[in-house]
Amino acid sequence: MSTTRITGGHIIATLLRDNVPLTAMVAAPKIKQGRVPNGPLPVIVVKTVSVVERQALKRGATVLRTDRVSATVRAASYRDQVDIIELIKSACAGRVGDIGGGTNVSILPAGTGPDLDGPGDSFEQTQDFRVSFVAAA
């Protein structure tokens, strides 16, 4: 049994790394959680924005947890940024089931952020999701 604590970010990162059309544009090792990796573009960074966890009424119970997760694209061109955002939405939005180690997962899109000028003359944009799943209390 895995000791990895399942989070909405983990679930989204798993879906992104397992999506063949997306990994044709962004290599799976360039899809990270936490920090933007160094090196050539494009990259995707998955971060948890917020967590809503219901309170368990007894020990050992499970709770419904909803994480707001952002997937940020940094690309060398505006066209790549737009294409990658669309692939991210396609890979994650509307997915349900047991996904990425999560039980009873439900993923809804939660908005696309503005176009930003990234460092080093790069292009950035964020796609947010609401990831609900059953978690240990």
Image (cartoon, rainbow, N blue to C red):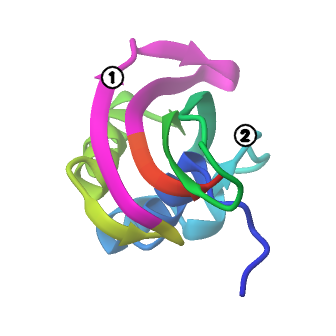
Identify which residue is drawn at 77% across, 40% down. 35
Q: Disc 2 to disc 1, how far (Cα)?
A: 19 Å
Expressed as whole percent of the image width and height from the top left, the position of residue 80 reads 37, 41
Image height of 118 relative to 52, above or below: above
Identify which residue is drawn at 62% across, 35% down. 48
> Magenta stretch mostly in which secondary structure?
strand
Q: Residue furthest bottom?
A: 1
Q: Which residue is mark 2?
A: 36
51 falls in the magenta region: no
Disc 1 secondary structure class: strand
Q: Amino acid at mark 1?
A: Thr
Identify which residue is drawn at 54% across, 72% down. 101
Point out the stretch of residues depicted in magenta.
Answer: 103-130
Identify which residue is drawn at 44% across, 60% down. 16
118 falls in the magenta region: yes
Disc 2 secondary structure class: loop
Nearest to N terminus: mark 2 or mark 1: 2
Is residue 38 or residue 85 the one in the foreground?
A: 85
Expressed as whole percent of the image width and height from the top left, the position of residue 43 reads 58, 47
Image quadrant in which the N terminus is located: bottom right
Residue 70 relative to residue 31: left or right? left
Q: Which residue is mark 1?
A: 112
Q: Quadrant of residue 115?
A: top left
Q: Quadrant of residue 110?
A: top left
Residue 89 relative to residue 104: left or right? left
Residue 39 relative to residue 90: left or right? right
Q: Which of pointers 2 and 1 indicates the residue nearer the eye?
A: 1
Expressed as whole percent of the image width and height from the top left, the position of residue 102 reads 49, 65
Q: Residues within 10 Å of mark 1 (few under 14, many from 20)?
A: some
Any mark on residue 136, and which? none
Q: Is residue 52 visible?
A: yes
Q: Amino acid at mark 2?
A: Val
